[in-house]
Image (cartoon, helix red, strand yellow):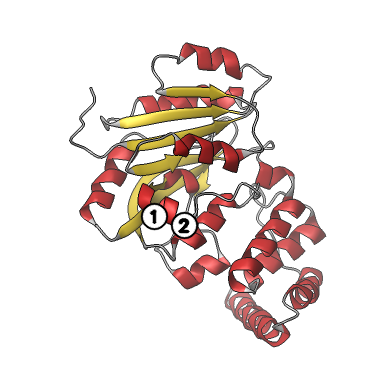
Amino acid sequence: MTDFSLPLVSIVTPSYNNAPFLAECIESVLTQDYPNIEYIIMDGGSTDETPVILERYRGRVAHIHSAPDSGQGQAINRGLVSAAGEIVAFLNADDAYLPGAVSEAVRHITAHAQIAVVYGNAFHVAEDGTTLAPYPTRDFDRDALQRNCYICQPAAFVRREAFERAGALNPALHYVLDYDLWIRLSAAGDFLRIERFLAKSRVHGGSKSVSDRRAFYREVFSMLLKHFGYVPYEWVQGYASYLVERKDQFFTKPGSTFVSALLCLAIGSWINRRHPGSFFKDWLAHRAIGSALARHD
């Protein structure tokens, strides 16, 4: 039963050929105990079993739209334009909320008028739903956000006013549109981390950031240069490790070898050629930390 005395939460799910995971995603929204949710599904014209699944939920989901789009960002923006919620979120079709997630997020965001974004902890899960590990979430720190995307997108809820002030999602981005949004939102208001686990973020072979790591890193670099004019060591070393090892970096932890360290220095110096001294100091500092930890072990 809808309780109009509580803030309306609008949740948008972008979907394209994610039939194996879609029903779990939808059910995770429909079974939330929060009584004032507007749920919108934006399907990009799926050719798998998605249309059949969506038909089963007509009448239970507020809005189901199916039309071609240019990607995830455009689909979510389109959905939120028609939404009426004071609080907004987007949940990819292969992710899912944990029970009580929406209630917990609303409780915290309404208790802190200055907060633009509330985010919780989350689990990385495999294709079959097996829990892999907790998402590496941390307390909010604007400076640390440049070095690591530690906010798990399905576990984040945003005030609509802040989302609009930040300029919504950038539809030109395909791999890091959430990371880009957090950076822009960090200038629009404060973030609050809550300790509760709110969501499951699925990692599988079809995930964009897993299947094309080279394009993923290139988009990260371009986005960080746009915002900060600098790409930190952590991102460059991750890319260098990928080029050397060719591993997915989710199911296998990226390493740091002598070769990847030298490659990191070369790539980082080129990308940050306007600030070569800054990157060299960044590189040296991390190499020194790594050596100290190795001696300690």
The image quadrant where one finds the C terminus is: bottom right
Q: Residue at horizontal 59%, vertical 16%?
A: 51
In the displayed structure image, the side of residue 165 where residue 252 appears, left or right: right
The image quadrant where one finds the N terminus is: top left
Q: Is residue 143 above or below residue 175?
A: below
Dot 2 amino acid type: Ala
User: Viewer-proximal residue, 75 or 31?
Assistant: 75
| Residue 296 position by quadrant | bottom right
Which residue carries the number 1 mark?
Answer: 162
Q: Residue at horizontal 57%, vertical 36%?
A: 75
Asked if residue 282 can be seen in this view, the reply is yes
Q: Residue at horizontal 76%, vertical 78%?
A: 269
User: Viewer-proximal residue, 281 or 61?
Assistant: 61
Q: Residues within 10 Å of mark 1 (few under 14, many from 20)?
A: many
User: Viewer-proximal residue, 131 or 99?
Assistant: 99
Disc 1 is placed on an element classified as helix
Which residue carries the number 2 mark?
Answer: 166
Dot 1 amino acid type: Ala
Instruction: Tell me where residue 79 appears, x and y as whole percent.
Output: 49, 34
In the displayed structure image, the side of residue 197 where residue 7 appears, left or right: left
Instruction: Tell me where residue 123 appears, x and y as whole percent.
Output: 47, 44
Disc 2 is placed on an element classified as helix
Instruction: Tell me where residue 231 appears, x and y as whole percent.
Output: 65, 71
